[in-house]
Amino acid sequence: MKKIFIAGSTGSIGRQALEVIRKDPQKFKVVALSANSSSEILIEQAREFLPEVVLIKEQSAYEQVKQALKSLCEVTLDQNILDELCARSDLILNAVVGFAGLPVTIAALKKNKQLALANKESLISAGELVKSLLSFSNQILPVDSEHCAIFQCLKNEDKKDVSKLVITSSGGPFRGYKKEELKRVSVDQALSHPTWKMGPKITIDSSTLMNKGLEIIEAHFLFSVNYDAIDVVIHPESIVHSLVCFTDGVSLAQLSKPDMRAPISYALYYPNRSHVSFGSLDFSMAFNLRFEPPDKDVFNALDLAYYAGALGGCAPTWLNAANEVAVEAFLNSQINWLDIMRVVEYTLNHYQKCSQEALNAILDADLEARTIARQILNKLSA
């Protein structure tokens, strides 16, 4: 029985991971759950899966969770327990949203544990540090549908034969829009994704294509591929989850319906596969697969990501920090949709070179970028 620690269990990925585990309870034991502040969902999860430890971040939610679960498991606020929770586990699923997920990634890798990584920001903000902590091959199992697809396509291939990685994008809710139209889009419109059901932050990132920008950087660190060998294409059906092109002209792709339980399942069962199907396609039915280039004039997040990647060092850390600040401001109706990338671009213009090799430097870079992003935000919203 594989022992699992789910960090960020009350979010979209965490909840879907528990759905996968629920279908095969003899295969997995949930030893720990963690959440930020969603006390009621966390209590319900703990009552069903009976973990040994529940970690809650917000003091305001702690007493409610502790009182509800006092006879069932240990409930703690102590974030320093991450090392212990990782030590108790065979696999850690990091489903925390944003930069806040970095401590989970570091703790898992330092304990030489298998890490199922849905928290792409760990690699964007601290890719060099994260790579330095790897202790065995395939220690990180990517849970992004795109990187899970690439991982599967590369499984039995020699990486020296790779000519290009192609990351697919649905195009989000604003595919085909012009800049003039985007001046007036609402938060609700941006949260209406055409094919995927996700949390608010990643859904907004999908609307700006910043999720693809972050995935470019993530792919660079995960697969050790140069940025000029990573492309993004728009694929509205979200059936081809990414492709790998090889030097002999052959391309391999992974296909399934858009269902995040598929990459989650792949990571939880690795190196085997589940016998429970998620997202299977019926090839006896006709369907179309369309591909088109992204409109980089309208969606400049891709160029900003390539730029940050080319700068290297903590530039991706700055990119991620500025984007998190801007997305939060948009969700709170402080700025309009077009201002999200303005905040990111203007913040990157202030970047001062530093290295991602030390945690303190990364934390300082993240803080500095957020400070500058908020200053820019105040000017835009004044």
Image: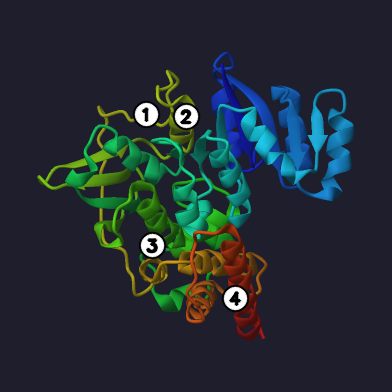
Label 2: state its secondary structure. Answer: helix
Mark in the foreground, 4 or 3: 4
Residue 273 in picture, x, y percent from top left: 40, 23
**What amino acid does circle 3 point to?**
Arg
Give the mark toward the camera: 2 or 1. 2
- Asked if residue 162 lies left or right of residue 267, the reply is left
Residue 267 in the image: x percent, y percent?
A: 46, 32
Q: Which mark is residue 265?
A: 2
293 vs 371: above or below: above
Dividing the picture into quadrants, the one containing residue 89 is top right
Instruction: Give the labeled residue for mark 4.
Output: 373
Q: Residue at x 57, y 56 (%)?
A: 201
Residues marked 4 and 3 touching at CB (< 8 Å): no
**Could you tell whether 217 is left or right of 11 in the image?**
left
Give amino acid for label 4.
Answer: Ala
Query: The N terminus lies in which quarter of the figure?
Result: top right
Q: Cα distance, mark 4 to mark 2?
A: 37 Å
Q: Secondary structure at mark 1?
A: loop
Which comes sooner in the sequence, label 3 or label 2?
3
